[in-house]
Amino acid sequence: MAVLKFRAYYEDDDAVYRDIVIKHTQTFLDLHNAILKAYEFDNKHQATFYRSNDYWQRGREISFEKYDKEYKVEPLIMADTTIGSEIRDTNQKFIYVYDFTKNWTFLVELINVAKEESSKIIYPATSRTEGIGPQQYGTRSLLGKKFVDIEEKYELPQKIDGFSEEGEEAALEENTEESADESTDEIEGAESDNEI
């Protein structure tokens, strides 16, 4: 049984990708779920694949379900379509679009075909993760969720001694200069009193 390895690039940054291994007898629904899991997205929105060519042009649609929109050709349904049935060449490409409102787009390319499956892997599976993926809702810190947990656990203060807010430093310097001027005036005044 053939095992296919697909590389799913995030369209906006080709340095961000996930490699997914899947059996050729599994369906596009399995691949759809594997991509969402690999990028840590939920499974609440509309989705579709397009068969593509080397120029990433959109061809036949393989959709989660038939949506209320105009189709040039009736779409294939993910759950009913095996991946092997849509492979036309050794570097077959698909475009995967998730959440038609946000329009998350991933370029999915076949990069390897293995004849033997591993008994240690439950297919489909993510075999490689490269780059920090997009955050489905909001933004993600480079340090991720772990740092937020540490902040909450130790209740790190907002302002740490030795650091000032913007503008405080200038005000502090002005106060120091005024104090120095007053001290100089007092000393000069005391010296003139001693002279009398």
Image (cartoon, rainbow, N blue to C red):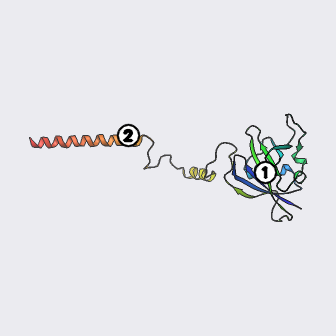
Instruction: Judge the density around disc 1: few (<14), some (14-19), many (≥20) Cα neighbours within 10 Å.
Output: many
Whether residue 179 is visible to the viewer of this picture, yes or no, is yes
Residue in the image at 74% along x and 54% along y = 18
Judge by depth and name the residue closer to the eye, 83 or 156. Answer: 83
Q: Which residue is mark 2?
A: 171
Q: Is residue 63 something one can see in this rendering?
A: no
Q: Quadrant of residue 115?
A: bottom right
* Most foreground residue, 94 or 161: 94
In the rendering, at what x and y percent does residue 139 appear?
64, 44
Q: Nearer the viewer, residue 100 or 72?
A: 72
Secondary structure of the residue carrying numbered label 2:
helix
Q: Decide: is 69 above or below 156.
A: above
Indicate the position of residue 103 as horizontal and vertical percent values: 74, 40
Quadrant where the N terminus is found in the figure: bottom right
Q: Secondary structure at mark 1?
A: strand
Which is closer to the viewer, label 2 or label 1? 1
Specify the quadrant that holds the C terminus.
top left
- Image position, residue 195 (x, y; %): 10, 43
- Alpha-carbon span between mark 2 and mark 1: 57 Å
- Badge 2: few (under 14), some or many (20 or more) residues near its Cα, within 10 Å? few
